[in-house]
Every structure is written in structure tokens, then in C-alpha cells.
Image: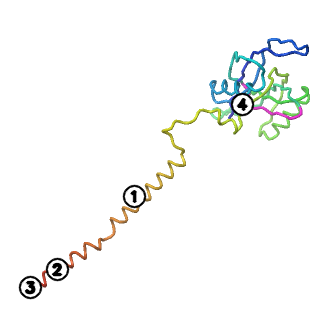
């Protein structure tokens, strides 16, 4: 399950008249911790915002999913409610979740959230949709793995550990099978010894 962090960024933005004006914008970042969220937002905005910018606040959001559409970049916050049965008591309880979807207006956002959640197994309602101040959403991509800190040098991938354990087990099994086999050299030495005794008696 994704964890979405809401990051507030402050910087000087040029308006239509060419004047610089201080603005505060909100971005949503998919990350595993506050530290990674901060690193990702600085990396993502470093090439798009001219001049200096400051991350003034980072908080964990209550969004459970986002549904981007390529034709528009206006995000709408959708409130989703549904009823489920409690596993312990068997009583029904109401669940409320929040999701984001891009749309031109509230009506289109409603249609798109219905489409995006069409595979849900429970009946849900969308009691509230509002336009969100979030400027952009940065989901985690495989190309972003280089942003993560490298693992400690003393740790090995699980596949290497398992392969090494299998090699050890095979070597141990081979050694045990060799111990169970009778030693041919020992029999030859014992045979040669008896043969020498017989030759001494004949002499």
C-alpha cells in the first residue's frame, strides 16, 4: 500500500506581468518515510523551479489512491464511503476514504472515480468532491530507485544467501555419503598384511 506525503513548497514564481511573487504550493509524494519524501520533492522540483525553493512542511496525507488522466492536470479530492462487516463482532461499520483524480470539473471527477473504482467488491458512495490545491502528484517509479540509500555492505541479497545455503547442504550431504561407504584402501591393506603372515610361515 502506498504512503502519500503532502509537501508544501514556497518559492518566488513569475506571474503573467513578469513580476516575481512568493507562492506556496502543495505536492503529493509517494514515499516510505518523511526523509525520503523530502529527498524526492527536492529532486523532482530541482529541475522545474527556477531559483531557490523551500519545503516548509511535510505531513502524511489521508489519501489511499490517486487516478491520473493525461488530458488534464487539475486534481479533485473525492470522499468515498462504504459499509463493511466487522470480522470480530459481525456488526457493520462505515468506512471513509479519500482519493484523488484528475478532471476538468466535479462532474467529470465523479464519472472518473466511478470508472476507476468499478472493480470494487462493495457498493460505495461518493458524497463529496472538491477541487484540490495540489499542483502535482509524484508516484513512486522504478527509475526513482537511485534516490534510495544503498543497502549496508554487510547485507547480501536473499537469493545469494539461499544459493550459498544450498551449496553448503549439497557439500554436507556428499561428505556424509562418503563416510557411509566402506574404505577400499583399508581392505587392501588388511589383505596385504595377512598375505605377509602366510609368506613368513612358509619360510
Viewer-nearest of labels 3 and 1? 3
Question: Are the residues tagged 4 and 1 within 8 Å (C-beta)?
Answer: no
Mark 3 and mark 1 in contact? Answer it, CB < 8 Å. no
- Residue that badge 4 annotates: 92
Quadrant where the N terminus sits is top right
| Spatial CA span between label 3 and label 1 | 47 Å
- The residue depicted at 33 percent of the width and 66 percent of the height is 180
Q: Is residue 164 magenta?
A: no
Local secondary structure at mark 4: strand
Label 3 to label 4, Cα distance in Å?
A: 101 Å
Q: Say whether disc 3 or disc 4 marks the residue closer to the N-terminus.
A: 4
Secondary structure at badge 2 equals helix
Q: Nearer the viewer, residue 84 or 35?
A: 35
Q: Residues within 10 Å of mark 4 (few under 14, many from 20)?
A: few
Q: Which residue is mark 1?
A: 172
Q: Nearer the viewer, residue 47 or 60?
A: 47
Q: Residues within 10 Å of mark 2 (few under 14, many from 20)?
A: few
**Marks 1 and 2: in contact by CB < 8 Å?**
no
Left or right of 90 on screen, residue 16: right
Instruction: Identify residue for label 2.
Output: 194
Above/below status of 108 relative to 57: below
The percent coordinates of residue 141 (x first, y second) are: 71, 37
Residue receiving disc 3: 201
User: In whole angstroms, how far apart are the C-alphas of marks 2 and 3?
Assistant: 11 Å
Quadrant of the snapshot with the C terminus: bottom left
- Residue range highlighted in magenta: 62-71
Amino acid at each position: 500500500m502506498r504512503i502519500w506525503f503532502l509537501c508544501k513548497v514556497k518559492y518566488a514564481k513569475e506571474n503573467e506581468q513578469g513580476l516575481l511573487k512568493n507562492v506556496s504550493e502543495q505536492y503529493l509524494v509517494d514515499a516510505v518515510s518523511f526523509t525520503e519524501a523530502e529527498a524526492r520533492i527536492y529532486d523532482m522540483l530541482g529541475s522545474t523551479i527556477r531559483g531557490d525553493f523551500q519545503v516548509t512542511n511535510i505531513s502524511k496525507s489521508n489519501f489511499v489512491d490517486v487516478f491520473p488522466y493525461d488530458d488534464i492536470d487539475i486534481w479533485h479530492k473525492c470522499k468515498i464511503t462504504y459499509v463493511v462487516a466487522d470480522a470480530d463482532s459481525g456488526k457493520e461499520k462505515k468506512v471513509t476514504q479519500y482519493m484523488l483524480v484528475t478532471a476538468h470539473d466535479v462532474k467529470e471527477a465523479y464519472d472518473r472515480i466511478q470508472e476507476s473504482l468499478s472493480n470494487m467488491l462493495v457498493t460505495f458512495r461518493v458524497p463529496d468532491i472538491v477541487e484540490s490545491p495540489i499542483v502535482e502528484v509524484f508516484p513512486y517509479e522504478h527509475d526513482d530507485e537511485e534516490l534510495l540509500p544503498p543497502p549496508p555492505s554487510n547485507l547480501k541479497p536473499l537469493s545469494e544467501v539461499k544459493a550459498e545455503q544450498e551449496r553448503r547442504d549439497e557439500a554436507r550431504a556428499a561428505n556424509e555419503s562418503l563416510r557411509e561407504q566402506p574404505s577400499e584402501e583399508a581392505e587392501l591393506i588388511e589383505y596385504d598384511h595377512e598375505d605377509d603372515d602366510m609368506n613368513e610361515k612358509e619360510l
